[in-house]
Image: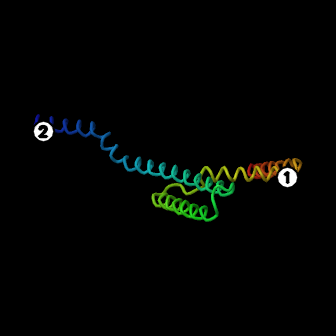
Amino acid sequence: MAVALAFIVLLAVVIVVSAPLRGAQRQRPDREREAKVADLLAAREAKYREIRDAELDHGTGKLSDSDYAALDSALRAEAVTILDELEAIGGPSGPGVLEQEDRVEEEQDGEDDRPAVQVALDERAAAERAGAGAHTEGT
């Protein structure tokens, strides 16, 4: 009886002590997936940067039309491959940092073209709409 009790206590100790090790093995695929997603996101941003650099080089005349066309199609094909890999492992498919920066710059450029009075009026109207929406939700 004492041997059976000692065996049960020893088994309980082994289970308790090895629990963190078993949990780490279950978490490994999640960590590997997160690392793969991070690598693919970095690759996506780098590829977008390469595409923008090629566009700039073409615009400044450093690349001929034929060289630009070949380089652009190759870079875009590589970008599509990266995006497909991201989609396959369930990574984020939203816009990258560079795309968001482009949108902000476009909005800022558009505001520079409008007179300051028009910008102020638009901002005031947006604030009034937001205030009216909050007021309506509160009642």
- SS class of the residue under badge 1? loop
Along the polypeptide, which appears first: circle 1 or circle 2?
Answer: 2
Between 112 and 118, the one lying in front of the other is: 112
Judged left or right of residue 17, residue 86 is right
Label for residue 89? none
Between 13 and 22, the one lying in front of the other is: 22
Q: Nearer the viewer, mark 1 or mark 2?
A: 1
Q: Is residue 69 above or below residue 4?
A: below
Residue at 58% across, 56% down: 94
Q: Amino acid at mark 2?
A: Ala
Q: Is residue 6 above or below residue 113?
A: above
Q: Position of residue 96 (x, y in %)?
A: 59, 52
Q: Which residue is mark 1?
A: 114
- The CA span between labels 1 and 2 is 86 Å
Count of marks, rendered view: 2
Q: Amino acid at mark 1?
A: Arg
Between 80 and 60, the one lying in front of the other is: 60
Q: Residues within 10 Å of mark 1 (few under 14, many from 20)?
A: few
Between 71 and 45, the one lying in front of the other is: 71
Judged left or right of residue 30, residue 72 is right
Q: Quadrant of residue 95?
A: bottom right
Residue at 79% across, 53% down: 110
Specify how the rendered protein is coloured. rainbow
Q: Position of residue 123 (x, y in %)?
A: 82, 48
Residue at 15% across, 38% down: 7
Judged left or right of residue 104, residue 83 is left
Label for residue 4? 2
- SS class of the residue under badge 2? helix
Q: Position of residue 45 (x, y in %)?
A: 56, 51
Quarter of the figure with the N terminus: top left
